[in-house]
Amino acid sequence: MEGSAPPAAIETRALRKVYGDKAALDGVDLRVPAGSFFGFLGPNGAGKTTMIRLVASLAPPTSGEIRLFGRPLETDSAEIKRQIGIVPEDSLLFEQLNGAEMLEFAGRMYGLGRAVARRRARELLELFELDGAGRKLIADYSKGMRKRLAMAAALIHRPRLFLLDEPFEGVDAIGARLMKQLLEEQVRAGATIFLTSHVLEVVERLCDRVAVIDRGRLVLEGLVSELAAGSRTLEDVFVEVVGAERRPPALAWLHP
Ligand code: ATP
């Protein structure tokens, strides 16, 4: 892991996470260069959310190593966590808070002073067009509103590393475009984005690198510009690497 190259934003070595007798992650060596817009892809149940949860210290690995910006996660956990912004798959939002309270809480948790957290919370609610819902309990938010709020909470402390699990899922086209613009801006300013998505057209357009995981193992990693070249799309590449042995038997009654 050492050397003259700048440390990666995320680096994992032999990372394993076992649930019962099943390995959700089965020896993953992954390097996410700092400053990259990185798409982490894979079929349902492949291990993407597990990976995000481990990198965000929301769950411990069974074995293996995680380094963020060159530092082992377990030794510097609190400090490193402050540099992370996360949009979890099922938003970790507190149902009995309203949007403004939630954002202010997130800002405070990440070390912002009260006045700054309050001001940024107000501005983010406005930016994400949630100001009308700022006083509404999160329990009463729609799915898309929750994702918008989760993204606002991820941005409030301007983290160096974003861990985004299906961030656009359920978000309308206007909200999704806003999120994409904000994320591209963060990458231009030096942040790293690690994102999962099943919408490969979006990944192809946004990300510069991707990795594909299947049944807990990495099966592909590379530059989008090299993988999806000419008329070959990222979807073609994805289906090729994970779809080949999954061709379902034809159901006669479904094919009149
Ligand atoms: P999807 O695209 O469907 O969201 P994913 O790639 O995010 O899938 P994970 O949620 O990481 O997949 O799940 C990987 C495997 O680990 C699955 O087989 C899942 O059932 C299992 N798993 C995940 N979390 C747990 C848990 N808390 N307890 C037991 N098994 C789990």
Image (cartoon, rainbow, N blue to C red):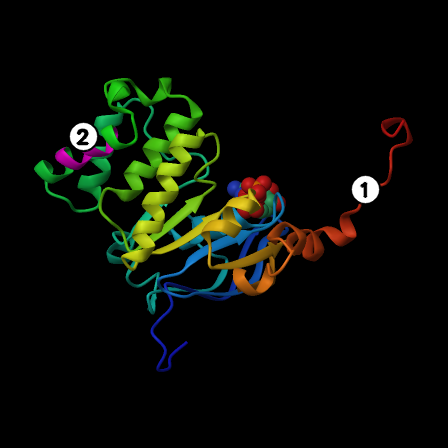
Determine the residue located farthest toward the bottom in the rendered image.
4
Within 10 Å of disc 2 (Cα), the crowding (few <14, some 14-19, many 20+) is some
The secondary element bearing badge 1 is classed as loop
User: Of 159 and 254, which appears nearest the observer?
Assistant: 254
Residue at the spot 30% in from the left edge and 22% down from the top edge = 96
Whether 158 is among the magenta residues is no
Left or right, 150 with reference to 23: left
Residue type, numbered disc 2 = Arg
Q: Residue 107, how many percent across, how many down? A: 20, 40
Q: Which numbered disc, 1 or 2, marks the residue that appears first in the sequence?
A: 2
Q: Main secondary structure of the magenta part?
A: helix
Residue at which label 2 appears: 122
Vertical side of 95 occupied by 33: above or below: below
Residue at the spot 35% in from the left edge and 82% down from the top edge = 4
Left or right, 33 with reference to 209: left
Q: Residue 6, how many percent across, how many down? A: 33, 74
Left or right, 119 with reference to 224: left
Boundaries of the magenta span: 119-125
Residue at which label 1 appears: 248
The secondary element bearing badge 2 is classed as helix
Residue at the spot 39% in from the left edge and 43% down from the top edge = 180
